[in-house]
């Protein structure tokens, strides 16, 4: 007769723990008010993007209507969205898709 090994109980993660692990993104949307140079300046000033990256992100907003400008924990994305609103830009927070992009498969390459 062999001794039986103790059976480990399955670990159940709390919903808040799972939610905390989910990544989110800040999406800036095109608007008819802000100039391209102003949006480039905001991206360069606030996010610290190099000028070529800030310009590329601005062009993505201008040509496709939206661009992912930051990714991370929800709380941090809420700070970024609030900051974008403070600069007068339209921005939203979205869950990051499984492919590492926003829900509409935005690309934020070049960081």
Image (tube, helix red, strand yellow):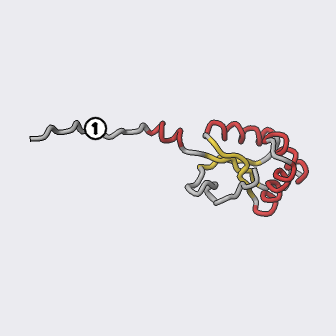
Rendered image quadrant of residue 82 = top right
Mark 1 burial class by Cα count in 10 Å: few <14, some 14-19, many 20+:
few
Read off the residue under disc 1: 8
Residue at far front of view: 1
Point 81% across, 41% down: residue: 48
In this rendering, position of residue 83 left or right of residue 44 = left
Q: Is residue 99 left or right of residue 92?
A: left
Query: Mark 1: which secondary structure?
Result: loop
Seen as rendered, the residue at the extreme left is 1
Could you tell me which quadrant the N terminus lies in?
Answer: top left
Identified at 51% across, 41% down, the residue is 19
Point out residue 16 in the picture as x, y percentages from the top left corner. 48, 37
**Which quadrant would residue 98 be assigned to in this image?**
bottom right
Direction bottom: furthest residue: 63
> Which residue is at a point 74% across and 56% down the rendered structure image?
66
Q: Classify residue 66 as left or right of residue 32.
A: left
């Amino acid at each position: 007769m062999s001794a039986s090994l103790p059976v480990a109980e399955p670990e159940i993660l709390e919903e808040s723990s799972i939610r905390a692990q989910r990544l989110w993104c800040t999406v800036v949307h095109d608007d008819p008010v802000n100039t391209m140079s102003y949006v480039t300046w905001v991206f360069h000033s606030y996010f610290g993007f190099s000028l070529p990256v800030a310009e590329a992100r601005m062009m993505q907003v201008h040509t496709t209507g939206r661009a992912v400008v930051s990714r991370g924990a929800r709380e941090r994305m809420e700070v970024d969205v609030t900051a974008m609103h403070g600069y007068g830009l339209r921005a939203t927070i979205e869950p990051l898709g499984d492919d590492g992009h926003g829900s509409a498969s935005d690309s934020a390459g070049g960081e």
